[in-house]
Every structure is written in structure tokens, then in C-alpha cells.
Amino acid sequence: MPPWTRSGPDSEGEGKQPPAGRWQAWAFGLLLLAAGLHCLRPLWGDDLFWQLANGRLILATHALAEHDPFTYTAIHPPVHDEWLSEVLLAAAERALGLGGLRLLCCVLFVSGLALLWLLAPERAAPARFALVAVAWIGVLPNASLRPHAVAWPLAVAVLAGVAPRAVAAWDRGSSWRPRLLWLSALGLGSVVWVNLHSSALIVPALLAVAAVGAVVDWLLVDWFLVDWLLRRSGGRGSVSHCRPLGEGPESSVPAAPAPRPKGGSGRLTPSRSGPLAWGSWIAAAVALAACALPPAGLGLLPYVEQTLQINVVSEEWQPLLTLDSWRAFPSAVLGWWLLLAATLAAGIAERRRSAATPAAEVEEPQPSAVTPAPGVAEPRRPVSASFPGFWASLACLYLAAGHRRMILFYFVPALWLAPRLVAAWSAASRRSRRLLATTAVAAAAVLALVELPDALARGPLRAGLYPQQAAGFLAAADLDGRLFHDLSWGGYLELYRFPRQQVFADGRWLLGGPEMLRDYRAMYGREGPREEIDRLFARWNVSVLVQSTAAFVAAAPLDPERWALAWIDPTAIVLLRRDQGFAERRRRICAFYGARPELAFHGRWPRWPRWPPPPLGPTGPSGPAAGGAAAIPAVLDECRAGAHPP
């Protein structure tokens, strides 16, 4: 016997399950506080800004754009798979401002975790807290305000509440009213979800996996595994039948085997289940039909596949089981392995228990004469097509292993494992339970304290992450022309510069295609001969370059005869390309600095005594110039010299 369990061969399952206890509520409350504080930190999602820009456009035009108006590299029409979230986010930003969006992010994720607590299939300790804790491990790397955050509470409601009940209503033979009621709720929830975020496609996928898994179980367990157990036992003896943990009321304690009638040859006969349950099949069909109702229809399927292929450079779409993922999110990687081990162990144990049942042992088998012993209920097989179930849980873990973003659905296998965790908790000693409960409460309290400093940070955006000063300069100088920029800044610049200026690309890389990404890599890092880089800038007709100051100095220098410095700060640098509109843009920049002479140091190359550069003060730092970047002339110097355009 393991040292953390009670002694005695028959101790497992003795007595009643331990109550939920106050510790579970305390740990949940502290974990909810930690999650709320984490989501209150300044906004940092790069895609949020182009989604706000698209939401503003939809609110202004009351229509979905057929061609992307924000980027000049788009060669494909936009797929409006998140239009409803974009409209809601834009409306919230209009009413609350960017600062209010921090509170909205907190409300969305906290409400989803609270709803998961209410919908937990098992209320005994520690199932509810463990379910919410596992869900938060999956949410933590994705806790940014984006359309998936808007859809998060609805995803919990559909996968943890509506879908299991819709499947159960059909599998248990309920009347038509609850069947149609839950199917209608599933269809409505899927329709709203798929217009909020394309991740709603996981609903029909998981339901279909559960349905196919039921067929596999029916074939494997009922026909092959039973025969294997019979051959292994030599056709004699008894294989105790236990209802799988988590099935039915009071399921965390295994059922006692039926008594063996006296006499007989001791043969073991297999127990075949009845006809397949169709609840998962019907629910999958309803969910799939609902996912065909957004503007793109079932065109979302190839769009999602293409998105996965082109987002190979995005961190959130990288495989989970890598060294980089372990360094960034060790809790998510460790949680995946624990969930996989628990899911496999529970699934194998469940199928072994369901493989055979003790039958009445008679000298001459006569099925019509077999009757259950007096006072002993006839063994019942559980419904094979349950949701989420073993197969849907494995499918979620498979998706998470392939794409880091999909760890958001860790709570699906946790839903299935929660009742089984109660059985393990019941087998633990009182001292072990107290130790684990104390650890859970203390860990949740520490998490809340760790998240407090970031939650108290001022400002709607994380400092130094976006070109706020550079965007303000572009607006104040009223510059026009196409922008080339850091790829993560595309959404921010289009939010504040559209329709005056277009950006190179935002988070929707599929619009520009692979060629756009190749050109961006060469132009941003100056990979190749200077003549080739100049040709690419001319091909895309770039007028203004907005790049990270650190990245600009680290890259190879541009041609000084083709570029001029307009603005520099510790975060971003703005350069003008000497094209046909250069003279007018230079005139506007000269007027900007003429009206604001106190900002003139932003228009000249600073002299940095060290790298990285120090923050620019009112008078600017002094020291030797940094690298060959200072060879590019400054527009401000040309203004003072009265130079004419070349």
C-alpha cells in the first residue's frame, strides 16, 4: 500500500466521501483573486489594436469590408471570423477607453473561471478547485484581451454545461422536451461563439471524436478485450465488475462485485452492451450546422488550416512540447504531461472494468433461466457515448501538444478527470489531505501577492512596448504615405493612423501571404545587398519607416542618400524615404519642430555613451554617435539649412 493511503487491503472506498470543506472555497477565492490581478495588468496583446480598428470600421459603416482597407500588402479578402468580438471590443473601448479594457479583460476571464466552478461535475473536494486550477494553467499564457477572451465564458458554458447535458439527454432516453431544449441551447451557443471566435469549431470536432470513440469502445471493449480477458483467465474464475469511476451517482466508490452463486463450473461470460448511443452524433451535427452560419460559413475550416500553416513564426502557435515552451510556460508543459498520464490511466482502467461482468454460473448455460440473485441489482453498463469522455480529452491534449494556443482547453480533460480525483482523495489519509489543502490555499495566496505589483501599474499599455510617442508625432505632423514597421506594431499604428496612412501588415498574415513575410524579413533585418533592400522598399512604395530603435541600430544601415531621420526616442525611430512626396512631408516636419522647439532633440541623432541608449531627457543625452546609423541626415538639419529636395 502507498504510504499516503490508509492501511488495510479493503480501505479504499470505506465510508462516505470527505465533504468539500472550507479550504476548497478559500483556495478558489484566492485563485480567482490572483487571476483577476493578472488580467488587470496593462494591455499587451498585439492583435487587440487591429481588432479595435476593424470594430470601429464596422460600427461606422454597418457592414463587413470585402477588401482590407488597413494594409497595402493584402492580396486576399479578409475573413471575418471574429467580427462580433471586434464590434463588442470597439464599443467597449469607445465607452471605457483603453484603461477600461483592462477591467473588461479581468471580468471576462474571472467570470469564465467562476462559471467553471459552478458547472463542475463533482463538488466534493478537491474536484472543483483542481478543475479551476487546471483551467487557469491553460488560460495564463493566453490571458490577453482578444476575441478568444470575449468568447472564453461562452466556451466554458458550452463545453462544460450545455454539450454534456445535450448528449446525456439523448443517451439517457429523456423525453423530447429536454432533448430539444438542450440541442437548441447548444446550437445557439455555438452560433454566437463562432461569430465571436473561430475556436468554436472545436465543439463539433470534440463531439465527433466522442462519437467515434464510442464506436471504438463498442468494437474494442465489447468484442476484443472481453475475449482476451476470457482467454487470459482460461474461461474460469471471476472478473469483478466495477462501474467506471465518475459514472452515475456515488460513483467515486467502486461497486462491489456480484456474489458468485454456489456450484457451477465457474465460467465467465462476456457482457455485451446494448445499441450505440447517438447523443454525441446528433450534438456534433447540430454544432457543425451552427458553425456554418457565420459570414464565412464552412470556409472557416480551410482558413483555420491555412492560418496554422502561415503562423509558423508566431510563438503562440508553436508546439507545446519544446524546450522554448518549457522555458516560457513550465506549468503548462508539466500540466500537459500530468493530464496525459491521468487521462490514459483512467481510460485504461475504465475499459478494463467495462470489459467483463460476472454472469450466473450454471452447469448448462440457458440464457432464459438466468436471473439475478435475490437482493442483488443486475450489473449495468455505462453509456458508451459520454461527453467529454476519454477520447475527447485525448483530442484536446493532442491539439495542445501541436499548438501552444490550444492549452486554453485544458479544462475539458479536467472535467472528465474531476470525479476520478475524488476517489483518489478519498483513499488518502487525513494527514495527507490536510497537507495538500494547506498547500493549495498557500499557493493561491502567494500567486495573488505576486500578481499585485503588475495590477497596480499605471497606464493602459505596458511601457515601452508600443510606439506611442512616434505615433503621436505622426499624427501631430500630419504625415501621409505608406508605413513600414515592426510586425507587432501594425495593429497599433493602423488604429491611430487609419485612414491617413496604411500599414505594411498586422496580425492577419494570411492576407499578404508567404511572399509578404519573406519581403518583410529582408526589409526589416536588411538581409541581402543594399541595392536589393532599396528595391523592395521601392516595390512596396514605402514612404515612412517606423522601427524599434534597438532593432534599427542592430541591423545593417540603410542608404543615407535615400533616407532622412524624422524622429527618434528610446522605443521607436521614424525615417522618411526620399520619394516623390518627401518635400511635402519634410515641410510638415519642419513646421512641427518650429512650433515645438522643446522637442527638437527628437529630430537629431543623439550621442549615446553606451548601448542600450538611456531615456531621452528634455535636453537629450550626449556622447559618441552609435554606429553608422547617424550617417543618415536629419530632416531637422535640412530645415535649418533651407535645403531643397533632391
Image (tube, rainbow, N blue to C red):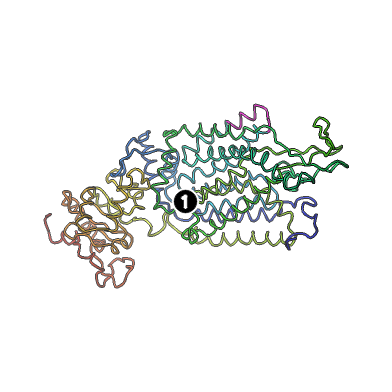
Figure quadrant of residue 231:
top right
Residue 337, position as x, y percentages in the image:
57, 55
Q: Which residues are magenta?
A: 172-183
Image point (52%, 54%), residue name: 140
Helix, strand or loop at label 1? It is: loop
Of 114 and 519, nearer the camera is 519
Of 368 and 244, nearer the camera is 368
Figure quadrant of residue 568:
bottom left
Query: Horizontal placement of 264 versus 305: left or right?
Result: right
Identify which amino acid the numbered label 1 is placed on.
Ser
Q: Is residue 225 magenta?
A: no
Residue 496, position as x, y percentages in the image:
33, 48
Taken as a whole, is the magenta stretch helix, strand or loop?
A: helix
Image point (47%, 53%), residue name: 319
Of 591 and 68, nearer the camera is 68
- Exactly how many numbered labels are in the figure? 1
Figure quadrant of residue 92:
top left
Query: Horizontal placement of 346 versus 401: left or right?
Result: right
Residue 438, position as x, y percentages in the image:
67, 61
Q: Residue furthest right?
A: 262
Query: Horizontal placement of 179 versus 565: left or right?
Result: right
Residue at image mark 1: 144
Residue 498, position as x, y percentages in the image:
31, 44
Image point (31%, 65%), residue name: 616
Query: Horizontal placement of 468 versus 374: left or right?
Result: left
